[in-house]
Amino acid sequence: MTELSDLHNLQLAIEMEQDSSQHPDECTGPEPLTPMTDKWPEPPEPTETPLPPPKQVWGPGLPILTAEAAVTTRYNQGKPQLSYILEFGRALDLVAGVMERGAMKYDRKNWQLGGENMSLESILDSVMRHLKASLSGEVFDRDMKTDHLANAACGILFALYHHGMRPKGE
């Protein structure tokens, strides 16, 4: 078995040598290793290369502009900056924990179904119970095993989802 692999390796070496002799201008392999020195090699001299011409930016109905002249227009004034929510990382983790426990107990989107269990009074009663428990020193809800304040925050979000910004009488 060893003789066959030696023969195969010898054949490959001969083929590589023949191939490299047919193409002398091509790179035949890595440069030989040089001994390490205490000094870094000198960097190559900088050469000035001209910058490519600016790319053209255009689209249907838009004038042709250079990339330097193109300016993005945004109409975000007066709109909520939702990235502020990300500043509440730990609090959002706790609220997500309440949502996960609720999904295990009821169903993932059960809270979106509405109905009389999601009336504003029912939601706020639950929020107030969690706030009262938190104010009395109880940290975790015995039933859900989640933080009372996170449960209250979740309830406020439910109230906003179902009842926020509604005209009176609806």
Image (spheres, rainbow, N blue to C red):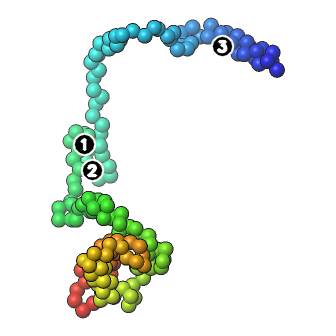
Helix, strand or loop status at disc 1: strand
Front in this rendered view, residue 89 or 160: 89
Q: Amino acid at mark 3?
A: Met
Q: CA distance from mark 3 to mark 1?
A: 53 Å
Comparing marks 2 and 3, which lies closer to the viewer? Answer: 3
Q: Quadrant of the N terminus?
A: top right
Find residue 82 and report its horizontal and vertical position in percent.
26, 62
As drawn, is 142 to the left or to the right of 169? right
Residue that numbered label 1 is attached to: 65
Front in this rendered view, residue 54 or 9: 9
Find residue 145 and report its horizontal and vertical position in percent.
41, 73
Q: Confirm whether residue 76 shows in the render.
A: yes
Q: Are marks 2 and 3 in contact (CB under 8 Å)?
A: no
In the picture, the disc for residue 62 is 2
Q: Are marks 1 and 2 in contact (CB under 8 Å)?
A: yes
Q: Amino acid at mark 2?
A: Leu
Helix, strand or loop status at disc 2: loop
Mark earlier in primary sequence (2, 3)? 3
In the picture, the disc for residue 16 is 3
Q: Confirm whether residue 163 shows in the render.
A: no
Helix, strand or loop status at disc 3: helix
Find residue 22 and report its horizontal and vertical position in percent.
63, 9
Task: Name the residue at 27% across, 18% down.
Answer: 48
Q: Is residue 110 above or below residue 35?
A: below
